[in-house]
Image (cartoon, rainbow, N blue to C red):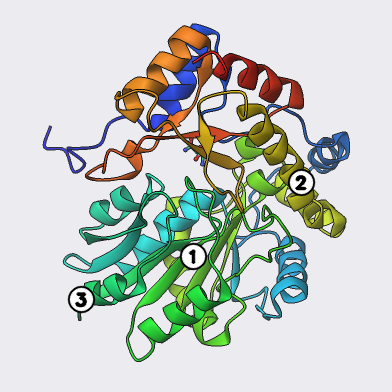
Amino acid sequence: IASRLPNVGTTIFTVMSRLAAEQGALNLSQGFPDYSAPPLLYDLVSKHMRAGENQYAPMAGVLSLREAIAEKVEALYGARYDPEHEITVTAGGTQAIYTAVTCLVRPGDEVILFEPAYDSYAPSIVLNGGTVVRARLEFPDYRPDWEAVRRLVTPRTRAIIVNTPHNPSGTTWTETDLRTLARLVDGTDIVVIADEVYEHIVFDGLRHESCARLPELAARSFVISSFGKTYHVTGWKVGYVLAPRELMTEFRKAHQFIVFTVNTPVQLAFAEYLRDASRYLELGAFYQRKRDLFRSGLAASRLRPLPCTGTYFQLVSYAGLTDETDVAFAERLTREIGVASIPVAPFYEEPPGDPVLRFCFAKNDDTLLRACERLARV
Ligand code: GLN
């Protein structure tokens, strides 16, 4: 068959989780918690199922959920989104990104992304006939080089995909980064697709710099978040997108034919659950403690953690430990010492060969401590 994605295999997250399961390894690879959400959340879903709320939700999502999202976003970022026209509930962040790209990109359009990049971005662009234009976040600090980004902008640039807090580097952008981005797109038609699915997982007293905070950016951005990340239920696949009305009208044209609508009882449950702000406000502290536990556990090993200011991912450098590629080293660690991680090479079209692995610390303390004990042996 003439493949439209000839260079794409199975995502590294599936590959490493499968290898971890086969080998009975501790799975710090794919990003998902190995603990449960509070039972109340499950009770709420079950309550709505039993109440007979099991048919299609409105195409844009359950209105009470969109209202709760609007209140949260206004309280956190001072941005007002009209639940009727400017908020859509999606089947997770990945679908929101795909749909945003699909409703924007025409054949020949260019889309800028930052490598290392989450592995769904480029295929979404390619499937829509777009051209992927790559900016680099360089090891070891993974900071954007805004002058280099500026040189990538052409009259064909349709969109720019940004991601903060950033997967896989665990870095976060500053307010200055967002202001620079705003200046860069000023006077163009470039749309910003902002993957902010780790918005509540930010550490050390920093605040999440959302594209929704800056009115001039918000006016041209799709801002995407994910309940899976925030509420420890990645398998439920529910997230949302914010955008000004004109952009959202286009988004919904595509959305209705991609998924039409999203799981009704889960949306109703989130509409209630979201009202308690402490649940997302405490998430940063919850993960900061796990980050610190994992980082201090690594002190006994020859792996060196890089700075991590957000997400539930910790990059570690293995410079000087082995000359193996990250893919080979991650595989060997899984097989030989029973700890699975994610190599960073699959986040690039042309991997730079940096000696780094990504570990997910959204795991029980016991899992993290056992992983550190094993990692101390390499
Ligand atoms: N976002 C998750 C990660 O980075 C994986 C999601 C997936 O498996 N597609 O690990």
Local crowd at mark 2 within 10 Å, few (<14), some, or many (≥20)?
some
Residue 62, quarter of picture: bottom right
Secondary structure under the numbered disc 1 in the rendered image: strand
- For the residue marked with disc 1, what is the amino acid? Ala
Which residue carries the number 2 mark?
A: 53
- For the residue marked with disc 3, what is the amino acid? Arg
- Residue 31 picture location, percent across and down: 56, 36
Examine the rendered structure and indicate whether residue 220 appears above or below residue 348. Answer: below
Which residue carries the number 3 mark?
A: 156
Q: Is residue 324 visible to the viewer in this orientation of the structure?
A: yes
Q: Residue at x 48, y 66 (%)?
A: 252
- For the residue marked with disc 2, what is the amino acid? Glu
Between marks 2 and 1 in the image, the one whose residue lies nearer the viewer: 1
Residue 153 lies left or right of residue 254; in this view the side is left
- Outermost residue, left direction? 2
Examine the rendered structure and indicate whether residue 125 appears above or below residue 320. Answer: below
Q: Is residue 254 visible to the viewer in this orientation of the structure?
A: no
Which of the two labelled residues, at mark 2 and mark 1, occupies the earlier sequence position? 2
- Residue 79 picture location, percent across and down: 67, 80
- Spatial distance from mark 2 to mark 1, Cα to Cα? 32 Å
Residue 203 lies left or right of residue 301; in this view the side is right
Mark count: 3
- Outermost residue, bottom direction? 187
- Residue 257 picture location, percent across and down: 42, 55
Q: Residue at x 25, y 36 (%)?
A: 8
Residue 360, quarter of picture: top right
Are the two marked residues, 1 and 3, in contact with CB atoms closer than 8 angstroms?
Answer: no
Q: Nearer the viewer, residue 187 or 82?
A: 187
Kindly tell me whether mark 2's CB lies below 8 Å from ligand 1: no
Q: Residue at x 30, y 71 (%)?
A: 149
Which residue carries the number 1 mark?
A: 194
